[in-house]
Image (tube, helix red, strand yellow):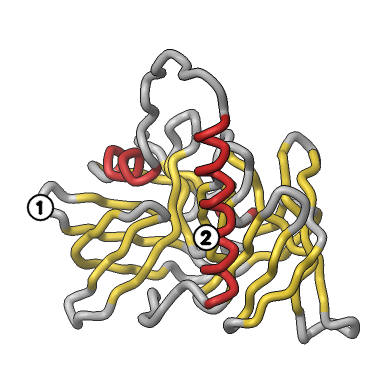
Amino acid sequence: MRLGGDPWPPVARRAARALACVAVIGAVVGGPARPARAVSPSPSERLRAAAHGTLRGRFGTLQFQRDGAVRFVVLECGYLPTTAGYVRSFTDCPPDTTTGRLDVGATGYDVTRPDGTTVHFAAYVDPTGGLHLGFGAVGQLAADRTGTIVVAPTEQLVVGRTGCVDVQTGQGRVVPCRFLRNRGRTVLVYPTTDIATPSGTRQAALVLVGARLLVSPELVDRVYARR
């Protein structure tokens, strides 16, 4: 469920401003203009285009009505991380049904239910046109693979050129991070706080989809299509 309040703690805002300054400087000194290229659809445009008809997958059924109403029947049974960028998702639980009015954003769908509460489903459309939906993180990087990803309501990851800042409940700390290839996927790995482990940290991973999307591993297999 989407929470209110400022989603950008001071540390994340400062990091974002620094990244923006670098982008402006690069645009000024980047050299002569290049021929214009066709503009690719934005993540929100791709999500809007996918939001019609009935889509099915191993984890449920998504129904989009023409009047903006939706009915999502999905399995959210949890998952177990296996290796960097991969999880094993469970399907041994009853499905959850969410109905309401749809709003499309850059990182997913908001469904406002009849009681007025809103559920946020993280979602993205992959390069082949498949719609992925669940509960996780979706964020877009700049062309140089820098940017800020909202991992959870109280956690952001600021991805820089030479490292990352892990921001939790408004407190940021610099952490090492790197892109690597693992079994066919490009994955960003970094350490994050985990009070359930003896060391207090665990290795987290986000999967690079296409050239600029970073998503939670549990979303990669949660694909829906028309059949």
Residue beneath disc 1: 67
The quarter holding residue 115 reads: bottom left
Q: Residue furthest left?
A: 67
Which percent across, then down, holds residue 100? 21, 67
Q: Amino acid at mark 1?
A: Asp
Front residue of 122/13: it is: 13
Look at 75% across and 78% down and name the residue there: 193
Which percent across, then down, holds residue 29? 56, 31
Give the CA separation, mark 2 to mark 1: 39 Å
Q: Is residue 118 left or right of residue 150?
A: left
Q: Is residue 215 left or right of residue 59?
A: right
- Badge 2 marks a residue whose secondary structure is helix
Q: Residue furthest top?
A: 35
Q: Find out whether the residues at labels 2 and 1 contact each other: C-beta distance under 8 Å.
A: no
Look at 41% across and 78% down and name the residue there: 6
Quadrant assignment for the C terminus: top left
Residue 26 appears in the figure: yes
- Badge 1 marks a residue whose secondary structure is loop
Quadrant assignment for the N terminus: bottom left
Residue beneath disc 2: 17
Q: Is residue 54 left or right of residue 95?
A: left
Look at 35% across and 33% down and name the residue there: 41
Between disc 2 and disc 1, the foreground one is 2
Which percent across, then down, holds residue 87? 70, 56
Q: Residue furthest front?
A: 29
Which label's residue is closer to the chain start, 2 or 1? 2
Q: Amino acid at mark 2?
A: Arg
Q: Which mark is residue 202?
A: none
The quarter holding residue 144 reads: top right
